[in-house]
Structure formats: structure tokens, C-alpha cells
Image (spheres, grey):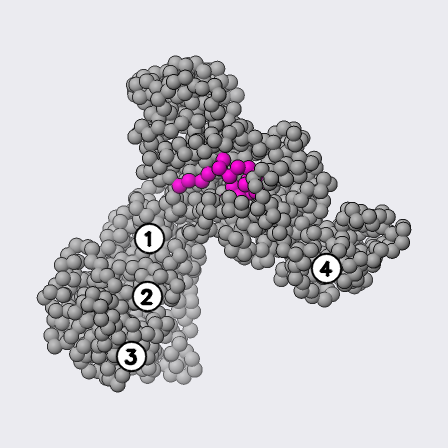
């Protein structure tokens, strides 16, 4: 039997004016198990807390009920005070007789009666309370960043700057991501490579950072502070340590007809390649789909000319096992496939390109050396039509996305402006649904495109693009002038919607991190915890969480790093003790609870049990990892047998409250 | 005020999730928005913690109405809890109605921490509705034919 | 069919492929059939006819805890319970050899008694017709006239998770719509529905037969038997559990119930308990898309998943009237 003390707070007149606090204290004093009661003007004051502590000592209380303001205000205060006097924090319950009683009722009799009932419910709960202690778990002081684009780079650098080790896993042969393919950046128009490549070098030179390029995450186990990850290092058939990155092999390889993915297939590379000049690590990679030696066993040119002896045709995938305290997802985005957009003739004409392809064509290191030329015949286009929202902001019935891809308005303005600046004789049309340019200096940038550079912005959608001889006939509607247009363009640029990288979905499953219907990772709270996943220890950086431009990505990446550093700084993690727990003797091992857990906190194990007939039996039972569980209780209702229960809000505690209220 | 002996005063149990609806209830207190004292709130971490057994238990012990409040769909502190709540309560309430229990005695409402006014209005409406229905007899009587 | 099953069982036993066979055995009367674990010595007592009604799947929970492999005969409806149990890891699949067998619908002795057919001593099954041998002579009936309600609404196909098939594969259309009675009740007023259920449920003697036969009720310890749950109570006193047992039980099997109809079959008071389960199935199908428990091993049950734009309780409750 508990020995419970009841403390009724007046809160000055806030409670005492509407609730007869003396009557409440006396009525609750008669409840079974209550050995002490008193009322006081301000329970939360120093003096009030001392009263609570003295009563605990003098009356050997095992639990306390404080009838006062909302537990959201002072539950922590009273629990801390009780703990100092030697009673476990979780033996204190609050009856909310201010916000949910005195402040909302005018009739004193009614309010007093209700306050007594609320007090009774709290007493009933304390009778079933048990001391709870938060579990502790150590923190591995190393972070894993998945994805080596600008988001991953920034996060890794910031974490490393704080003195923690960071590993970057990048599936491509080099880090750099999409930003390395971009020519200029809005709204300042500085060249992407000029600001990105120094950061890539910084990553390579940082002693705290390891780069696993051409690698993928294979398996993730564990929980916040204690992840163990298996990383697959794909065979690149080149010894990373020996290769000097001289690039001789990439010039001598006889297999020249490989589509160059870095230039989006606009030109060709060799079967052994370094994606671009500033690649990090600058190491060659053999493409096994095209290498004659790997396919037929006859060639070996690269191996013969490599003075470092770095070529190894027998290399196999290898695995690295490593422990991490935090995992950052920075898997980024891709433009959507446009094969299904026949109306824009993307698959039919080489002169209908995506905006990212346009970036490569205008980039000095791109397939045209930076001169704007048509892919079909290498001529200067004199009339360019940009189409916005291709696959964005659709109604959801087609193959496109319902969301706004966010970056297209700005990069299209950039493309249009740069074209007009370099080639003033070129006419540029932009078709848009809306122009969205919130952001620092963004609207000014767009207006410059229209006002200073004379780009024709037309509100309306393009209905069809018809290749006709050397021209692309663009049929479109002008919604403001209410007329149909037919433009004989030389080049059509489609602002394709962006979507999360395809690797994100299987990764989310591995990490038990949740995703929305568009495969963007969901954040722990859309406003207040935007860089954390609901799964503890998993953090989100960049476009894997939603469409973002570079400045936003970088700030989110740094915010993400701050959160990771905050976690890695700690030696131990203290959990919330109000977590679910499974009664192994009753658990059926049916896996229902696991399916509703948003945190992946529940696992199953085969355990041996001694049966009443003294035989041993192996049974599958659920076990909750208290370091991961957040205590929502979804599992407790999913469990049919009642084996799963929640500390601090147990079935019997809540039912005792129900009983006290309904009596 | 003289409490009218004749007037039926229903017992209402309100389960509120800690993060949104309980805070919403606090806000309606802070703003001094009145609602009847018949409503007694039980705090749960998430609406998905509410077991159908709790609701039936309340009815069996004399509650005349049970209301469950949680964060708006999409705003759950635990990301997905209220989605499960919605499915569970849809089925449970439909079953209670199937058994002939007045459908107005159960309710699921989404109340955010900012919706103090909505909380008070919801409770006023719910109490009025249940008062009109009168004492809950059916669930108690379901198994004993008089 | 019975002969075929006996032969195959004997073969499996003698080859050592299985150690035991789970099937049906007759008691004192032809309609007094119970599940039985056969070995080589008594395998010729295995029967299969219109009175072999028990769902055998549930027995695997206990049987696979023993050593050795057990063969089990699965009628189409049992096979769904079988998969559902497997999905919930309730038995060890490696210790089970599942044999799919056809079923032409089962007959309940109670129904026959109500039709005035008494003193049954034997049965001869045909595809369309059934001959009941009684003390007072043979009675021949159209099968559709006499088969049990649950079989009338059977959809007659196997869930695809068995090891071998014995006999022909049947494809059958339901004879009547299984939600007919649920819909009829939904159309009543709340008062009428309450009267209907009060009339039915007040007869409950809380014998737990429905729970004990239910292949979805396989908890190590039922919540109603668990003192810590706060709702435990075995005696039919005026208590919570007493009044709400059927609601909670139906809720616990919602999304897991395969609609095998065993609960109503075994109820000694003839309470149509399957209507509670069917109400849940109907609501699930209409709110969250067609779902058949036990049809698939991987598919998440409706209560274990959600859509962000699911309907609200208010969209569903009260629409029947």
C-alpha cells in the first residue's frame, strides 16, 4: 500500500477563488492510502516545494499528488523536488485543477466537486505507479553521412570541425553530387565548381573524414548512439591507394563508346574513367558493363600502361563494418524521367533537353566546352523555349508529382538571363504556371531577367512540341492575352520535377525512418524538428527531406550537423523511462506491435522458457529497446493479449483513472 | 447557482493526447473559455494509447459519453499515432453503433495546442448532445434483458 | 475423398515424411466429430464427410511444439486461418505438412434437427445432393437446402500456401451475399438493433467456446484471463468483462478474422457471433479497401497500416440508418 501525500495549491487566487481548496484537501485526505494532506498558497514556490519535501520525510510518503496548474507547467518542478527528498520522480502525479477546473468554471460548488474527482483520479493512478529509472546507453563518437553531395559535404565538414570522426558513403565514384554538374548558381551567378571543389578538397584533406566512394550502405543495426553499419565497397577494379589519378588510362582505353553519365549522356567517355577533372577521390573506375577485359578477358590496355600497377581486374565487392553514434541521410534528388511526356517530344528530338542537360551544355567543362550549341547539329539556337513545371504541381493522376519542385523558377530565370547575356541575338521564351521567387534577392533576380534582359515570360502551359525539320514547333497558350501561340523554336528546355533518389526508399527501410508518399524522408516535427527523423539518431540533410536550393541545403546541412554534434558530445544517453515493455510470458510473438511502431524499437527474439511441466521451450517474444522507444503507446493497443504495456501510462493506471472519474 | 435536482448531469470522459489536445485544453483554461464541469480529462501520451477497453470501461462504470482528442492528422508528435487511432476508433464506434449504442455518445476530435476555442466549443457541444440523450443505459444493459 | 485421405496419410506416415496426421474422427454419433491426431495404428479411423466441421489450423499451435512433423488437412476456409496463424508466427511451418483438400460445404446437426431430421446414423455425400441415413429411414436433400450458413457464404478457394493438393480443385461462387444480414441490421434504427443484440447477447453464458475454437484467438494468455489487465473476470457477474467481452473479442480479431464461422457454430446458445466479425470485415472493406485475412503472408493488416487521407469515424458511423 502506498503512503500518499496530497498537496492542494491555491495558486494565489487563481485556484482558490473558484475551488474550495480546504474542502478538496479534506475530501482527498479521506481517500485510501492518503496519509497526509495540506493546502498552500503557492506550491511551486521554494516554500511550497520544501513543504512537499518535509512531508515526504516526516510521513514516509511513497507518492504524492499535487493538485495545481497543468502538469505541462510544473510537473517537472514537483518531480524534481520529490526526487531530492528521496521519492522517485515518477511517484508524483499532478491533478490539473487550474487550467482544467478553476479557470473554466464559475460555480464554486461545481468546480470544487470536479477538483475532488480529478484529485481522486490522480490518487488512483499513484496507487499503481512504480518507481521508474531512465536507462542509459553509451554513444559511439562517430557519424555516418550517406550521400556526398553538397548536403553531405557540408554536414561532414561541420561535424569534423567539432572534432568528431565522420565517414561519407557515396555511391558514385566521386563526391560532389548534383552541384558538381551545375554551371552557375543563382542569384549571385558565381560558378558552382569554384565554390564546390574547394569544399571537396577540404573533405579529402580533413583527417577526421573518410570517404567511401563507389560504396553503398548494405545493412544497419542498432539504435541511437549505437548503430553498426555494414558498407559495401563496390569493386572499381582499381586499387584506390595505388592509383595516382594521372588519367592516362582514361585516354588510352580503346572502349570509347560509353555514354558519359556526368554529362547526362550528351557525350561519351571510356570504359575506365574519372567522372570529372576535380573528382574526389581522384581515382579511376572501370565500368564493368563496358570493359572489354572484364567482359571477354581480352584487352588489358589500362593495366599495361598503368605505371602505378593500380589496375586489378579480379577485385571483388568488399565490406566494411563500422560503429556510429549518428547517421545522416543526404541522398539528394534526381530530375524525374521524362519518357512519358510525349507531348514535349523529349524522347523524339535531341533538341528537347532537361534543365540539367542545359547546365552541362553551358558549362565550360561540358561536352560543348561551354558554347551553347544544339545537340542535334551543333548549331547556335536562335530561339529557345523554356517550359516550367514539367511533372511538378500535377493533380496526381498522371506520372508527375503533386508538389512544387521549388528550384525550377530560379534556375530557369538564371538560364534565360545567361543566354540573353552571352547571346543577345537569341530570343528566349519562358512558359510558367506561376513564378515563385521567395528568398533573399530572388525576386530581384527574376525581375532583372524580365526587365533588363528582355526574357519573354508567358503565363500558360505548352500543349505540344512538334519536331518539324530543323525546328521545334511549340504550341502553347497565353493565358493573359487569351490566345494560342505557335513558336518555331530551335531548342526546348524542360524544367523537370525533382524527386528523391531511388536509393532512398530501401535505405529508409534499413534505417526504420519514415517517408511520405513521395519518398521524401519525414522530419520528427515539420516545424520544430526539421532536420531530425522521427527515428532517434537519424538526421536529414538536403533534398532527401524535400526540394531545396543550394543555400537552403547548406543551411539545413549545418543545422543537421549541429544536431549530430549535440548528440555526439554526450557520453551517455538518458532515455525517457515512460517506454513500452513486453511481458514475455504473455507475448505471442505475433509481430503486430512491431508493425505499428514508428521507431523500429521492437524486435523479436527466440528465448528459452521454463514451462510449468519443467520442460524448456523456445518461444518468439517481442522486446522493446528502451533507448529507441518514445512511449507513444501504439503497440499497447495493437497487442491483443495485453502483453505490451507502457510505463507511466499502463493499462491498469488509465483504467483506475477512468474508474475514479466515473464512480 | 442552484443545481437543479431534476436536470440530468452526464459524466463525460475525455482522453487527450499530451502534445496537442491536452495543451489545447490548457489553452482554453488560460483563455478562461467556459465548458461544463461534466468533462473530466485523462492525459495520455498519444491518442493511439487509448485502448477500446478504456472506452468500454468508462461506459460500463457509468460514463454517458466518451470523447477522444488527438493532434490533427499529420501533426502527431509520434508521426503516425493518430492515423492508427483514426482507424481503430472508426471501427470501434461503428461497432458500438451496430450494437445499438447511440452514436452520439462517442466522438473523435482533432484539437491542436493552439485550438483552445475549438476545445471548449467541442466540449460544450458534446455535453449538450449527451445531455439530450440522457443516461447511458444500453451498454450496461446489453447483456441483461429486463 | 475419405479413402484418398487415409491412403495418402498412411503413405506419408510410413515413408517417415510425417510423424503424425491431424484430421477428424467420429465419436459416438456420425455428427459427433472431433479433431484427432492420428498415427499409423489408427489412421483408418480418419473420416471426412459433411459433419467434419472443425477448423484444424488452430491445433497446430500446440502440435508444433511437440517433436516431429505433423500433416494437416486444410479445407479452403481453414487454409486462410492457417496462413493468418503463420503470418503471426504462431506455429513452426517446418514442422507442418499442409494438404489442401476440397470441401463441398458442411452440415450442422442442429440445423437438421430444426428441419425435423433426427436420429442420424450415417451420411452419404454427393456433389449436389446429400443422403442422411436415419433411424427412421433415409432422407435425401439438395445440399444447398441443408448446408450451414457459413458454408453458404464460403468463397471456396485455397490460400496458396500448402504443400500438396489432394482431390480436385474447386472454384465456387458464394451462394448468397455474406453481408446481407449485417446490412439488414444496419438499416434498422438504433433501438431495433439494440433490441436485437440484447436479445442475442443476453443468452450468452460466457462459456468461452467461441474464444476457444477461434483460430485467431491463440494468445498465450487471453487478456480476459490476465489479472494484470484490469478486466479479468471469469464468472458471469455484472462486470465489465461480462458486458463487453464480445465487443473486445471482435475488436481483437478485427483484420485477423478469416470469417471461418466457427464461433457461431460452437455457440451453445446459438448467438450469431459471426455477425460482429462480419461487421468489422464489411467496414474494413468499405473504408480501407478489400482485405482478406490470411490471403497473403506479407500484406499488412488494415489496423497495422493507414492512409493519410483515411475517413473519419463520423464519415462511417451513422451511415447505415
Image coords of residue B72 (percent x, y): 38, 44
* Distance from Cα at disc 1 to Cα at disc 4: 55 Å
| Res A133 visible | no
Q: Residues within 10 Å of mark 2 (few under 14, many from 20)?
A: many
Image coords of residue A320 (percent x, y): 41, 59
Helix, strand or loop status at disc 4 = loop
Q: Chain of mark 1?
A: A
Are the residues under marks 2 and 4 on the same chain? Answer: no
Seen from the viewer's position, the closer of residues A387 and C177 is C177
Residue occupied by mark 1 = A540
Which label is found at residue A391? Answer: 2
Which label is found at residue C103? Answer: 4
Quadrant position of residue A280? bottom left
Quadrant position of residue A627? top left
Magenta segment range? B90-110
| Res B132 visible | yes
Name which of mark 3 and mark 1 comes first in the sequence.
3
Seen from the viewer's position, the closer of residues C107 and A527 is C107
Q: Chain of mark 3?
A: A
Image coords of residue A80 (percent x, y): 36, 27
Name which of mark 3 and mark 2 comes first in the sequence.
2
* Distance from Cα at disc 3 to Cα at disc 1: 42 Å
* Distance from Cα at disc 3 to Cα at disc 4: 62 Å
* Distance from Cα at disc 1 to Cα at disc 2: 25 Å
Helix, strand or loop status at disc 2 = loop
Residue occupied by mark 3 = A466
* Distance from Cα at disc 3 to Cα at disc 2: 19 Å
Q: Residues within 10 Å of mark 3 (few under 14, many from 20)?
A: some
Amino acid at each position: 500500500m502506498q503512503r500518499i501525500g496530497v498537496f492542494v495549491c491555491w495558486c494565489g487566487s487563481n485556484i482558490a477563488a473558484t475551488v474550495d481548496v480546504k474542502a478538496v484537501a479534506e475530501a482527498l485526505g479521506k481517500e485510501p492510502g492518503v496519509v497526509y494532506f495540506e493546502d498552500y498558497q503557492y506550491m511551486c514556490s521554494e516554500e511550497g516545494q520544501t513543504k512537499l519535501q518535509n512531508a515526504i520525510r516526516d510521513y514516509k510518503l511513497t507518492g504524492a499528488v499535487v493538485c495545481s496548474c497543468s502538469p505541462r507547467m510544473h510537473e517537472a518542478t514537483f518531480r524534481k523536488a520529490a526526487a531530492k527528498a528521496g521519492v522517485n520522480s515518477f511517484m508524483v502525479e499532478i491533478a490539473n485543477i487550474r487550467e482544467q477546473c478553476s479557470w473554466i468554471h464559475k460555480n464554486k460548488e461545481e468546480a470544487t466537486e470536479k477538483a475532488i474527482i480529478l484529485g481522486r483520479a490522480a490518487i488512483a493512478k499513484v496507487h499503481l505507479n512504480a518507481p521508474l529509472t531512465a536507462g542509459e546507453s553509451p554513444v559511439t563518437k562517430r557519424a555516418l553521412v550517406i550521400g556526398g553531395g553538397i548536403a553531405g559535404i557540408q554536414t561532414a565538414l561541420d561535424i569534423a570541425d567539432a572534432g568528431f570522426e565522420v565517414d561519407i558513403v557515396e555511391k558514385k565514384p566521386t563526391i560532389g553530387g548534383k552541384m558538381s554538374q551545375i554551371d552557375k548558381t543563382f542569384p549571385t551567378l558565381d560558378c558552382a565548381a569554384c565554390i564546390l571543389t574547394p569544399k571537396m578538397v577540404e573533405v579529402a584533406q580533413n583527417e577526421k573524414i573518410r570517404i567511401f566512394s563507389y560504396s553503398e550502405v548494405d545493412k544497419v543495426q542498432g539504435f541511437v548512439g549505437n548503430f553498426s553499419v555494414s558498407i559495401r565497397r563496390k569493386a572499381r577494379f582499381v586499387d584506390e591507394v595505388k592509383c595516382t589519378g594521372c588519367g592516362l588510362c582514361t585516354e588510352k582505353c580503346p572502349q570509347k563508346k560509353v555514354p558519359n553519365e556526368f554529362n547526362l549522356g550528351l557525350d561519351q567517355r571510356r570504359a575506365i574513367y574519372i567522372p570529372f577533372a576535380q573528382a574526389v577521390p581522384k581515382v579511376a573506375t572501370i565500368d564493368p558493363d563496358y570493359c572489354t577485359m572484364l567482359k571477354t578477358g581480352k584487352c588489358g590496355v589500362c593495366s599495361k600502361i598503368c605505371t602505378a600497377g593500380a589496375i586489378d581486374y579480379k577485385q571483388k565487392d568488399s565490406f566494411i563494418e563500422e560503429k556510429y553514434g549518428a547517421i545522416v541521410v543526404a541522398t539528394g534528388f534526381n530530375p524525374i524521367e521524362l519518357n512519358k511526356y510525349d507531348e514535349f517530344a523529349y524522347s523524339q528530338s535531341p533538341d528537347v533537353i532537361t534543365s540539367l542537360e542545359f547546365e552541362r551544355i553551358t558549362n565550360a567543362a561540358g561536352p560543348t566546352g561551354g558554347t551553347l550549341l544544339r545537340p542535334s547539329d551543333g548549331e547556335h539556337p536562335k530561339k529557345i523555349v523554356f517550359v516550367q513545371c514539367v511533372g511538378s504541381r500535377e493533380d496526381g493522376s498522371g506520372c508527375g508529382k503533386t508538389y512544387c519542385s521549388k528550384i525550377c523558377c530560379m534556375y530557369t530565370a538564371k538560364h534565360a538571363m545567361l543566354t540573353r547575356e552571352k547571346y543577345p541575338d537569341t530570343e528566349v521564351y519562358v512558359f510558367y504556371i506561376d513564378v515563385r521567387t521567395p528568398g533573399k534577392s530572388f525576386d530581384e533576380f527574376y525581375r532583372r531577367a524580365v526587365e533588363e534582359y528582355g526574357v519573354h515570360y508567358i503565363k500558360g502551359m505548352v500543349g505540344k512540341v512538334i519536331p518539324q525539320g530543323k525546328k521545334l514547333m511549340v504550341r502553347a497558350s497565353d493565358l493573359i492575352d487569351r490566345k494560342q501561340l505557335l513558336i518555331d523554336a530551335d531548342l526546348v528546355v524542360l524544367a523537370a520535377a525533382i524527386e528523391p533518389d531511388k536509393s532512398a526508399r530501401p535505405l529508409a527501410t534499413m534505417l526504420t525512418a519514415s517517408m511520405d508518399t513521395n519518398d521524401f524522408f519525414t522530419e520528427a516535427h515539420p516545424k520544430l524538428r526539421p532536420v531530425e527523423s522521427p527515428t532517434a539518431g537519424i538526421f536529414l540533410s538536403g533534398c532527401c527531406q524535400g526540394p531545396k536550393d543550394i543555400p537552403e541545403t547548406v543551411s539545413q546541412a549545418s543545422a543537421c550537423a549541429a544536431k549530430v554534434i549535440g548528440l555526439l558530445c554526450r557520453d551517455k544517453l538518458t532515455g525517457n523511462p515512460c517506454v513500452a515493455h513486453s511481458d514475455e510470458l504473455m507475448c505471442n510473438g505475433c509481430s503486430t506491435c512491431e508493425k505499428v511502431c514508428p521507431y523500429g524499437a521492437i524486435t523479436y527474439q527466440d528465448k528459452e522458457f521454463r514451462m510449468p511441466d519443467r520442460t524448456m521451450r523456445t518461444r518468439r517474444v517481442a522486446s522493446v529497446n528502451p533507448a529507441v522507444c518514445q512511449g507513444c503507446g501504439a503497440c499497447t493497443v495493437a497487442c491483443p493479449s495485453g502483453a505490451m504495456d507502457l510505463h507511466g501510462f499502463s493499462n491498469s493506471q488509465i483504467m483506475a483513472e477512468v474508474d475514479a472519474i466515473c464512480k | 447557482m442552484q443545481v437543479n435536482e431534476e436536470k440530468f448531469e452526464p459524466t463525460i470522459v475525455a482522453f487527450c493526447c499530451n502534445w496537442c489536445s491536452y495543451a489545447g485544453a490548457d489553452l482554453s483554461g488560460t483563455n478562461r473559455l467556459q465548458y461544463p464541469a461534466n468533462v473530466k480529462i485523462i492525459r495520455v501520451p498519444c491518442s493511439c494509447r487509448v485502448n477500446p477497453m478504456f472506452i468500454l470501461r468508462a461506459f460500463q462504470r457509468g460514463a454517458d459519453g466518451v470523447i477522444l482528442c488527438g493532434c490533427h492528422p499529420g501533426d502527431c508528435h509520434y508521426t503516425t499515432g493518430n492515423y492508427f487511432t483514426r482507424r481503430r476508433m472508426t471501427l470501434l464506434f461503428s461497432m458500438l453503433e451496430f450494437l445499438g449504442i447511440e452514436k452520439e455518445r462517442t466522438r473523435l476530435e482533432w484539437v491542436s495546442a493552439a485550438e483552445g476555442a475549438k476545445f471548449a466549443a467541442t466540449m460544450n457541444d458534446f455535453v449538450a448532445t449527451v445531455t439530450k440523450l440522457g443516461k447511458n443505459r444500453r451498454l450496461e444493459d446489453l447483456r441483461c434483458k429486463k | 475423398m475419405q479413402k484418398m485421405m487415409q491412403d495418402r496419410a498412411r503413405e506419408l506416415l510410413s515413408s517417415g515424411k510425417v510423424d503424425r496426421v491431424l484430421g477428424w474422427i467420429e465419436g459416438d454419433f456420425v455428427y459427433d466429430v472431433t479433431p484427432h491426431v492420428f498415427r499409423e495404428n489408427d489412421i483408418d479411423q480418419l473420416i471426412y464427410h459433411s459433419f467434419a466441421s472443425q477448423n484444424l489450423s488452430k491445433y497446430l499451435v500446440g502440435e508444433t511444439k511437440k517433436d516431429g512433423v505433423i500433416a494437416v488437412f486444410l479445407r479452403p476456409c481453414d487454409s486462410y486461418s492457417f496462413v493468418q496463424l503463420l503470418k503471426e508466427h504462431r506455429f513452426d511451418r517446418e514442422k507442418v505438412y499442409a494438404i489442401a483438400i476440397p470441401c463441398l460445404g458442411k452440415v450442422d446437426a442442429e440445423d437438421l434437427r430444426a428441419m425435423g431430421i433426427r436420429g442420424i446414423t450415417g451420411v452419404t455425400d454427393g456433389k449436389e445432393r446429400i443422403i442422411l441415413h436415419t433411424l427412421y429411414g433415409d432422407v435425401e436433400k439438395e445440399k444447398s437446402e441443408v448446408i450451414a450458413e457459413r458454408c453458404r457464404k464460403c468463397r471456396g478457394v485455397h490460400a496458396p500456401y500448402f504443400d500438396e493438393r489432394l482431390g480436385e480443385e474447386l472454384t465456387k461462387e458464394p451462394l448468397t451475399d455474406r453481408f446481407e444480414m449485417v446490412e439488414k441490421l444496419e438499416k434498422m434504427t438504433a433501438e431495433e438493433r439494440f433490441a436485437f443484440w440484447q436479445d442475442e447477447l443476453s443468452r450468452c453464458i460466457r462459456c468461452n467456446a467461441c474464444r476457444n475454437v477461434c483460430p485467431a484467438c491463440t494468445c498465450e494468455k487471453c487478456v480476459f484471463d490476465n489479472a494484470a489487465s484490469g478486466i479479468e473476470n471469469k464468472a458471469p457477474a455484472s462486470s465489465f468483462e461480462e458486458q463487453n467481452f464480445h465487443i473486445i473479442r471482435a475488436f481483437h480479431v478485427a483484420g485477423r478474422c478469416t470469417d471461418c464461422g466457427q464461433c457461431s457454430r460452437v455457440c451453445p446458445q446459438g448467438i450469431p457471433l459471426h455477425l460482429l466479425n462480419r461487421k468489422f470485415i464489411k467496414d474494413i472493406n468499405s473504408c480501407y479497401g478489400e482485405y482478406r485475412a490470411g490471403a497473403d503472408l506479407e500484406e499488412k493488416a488494415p489496423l497495422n497500416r493507414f492512409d493519410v487521407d483515411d475517413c473519419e469515424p463520423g464519415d462511417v458511423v451513422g451511415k447505415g440508418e
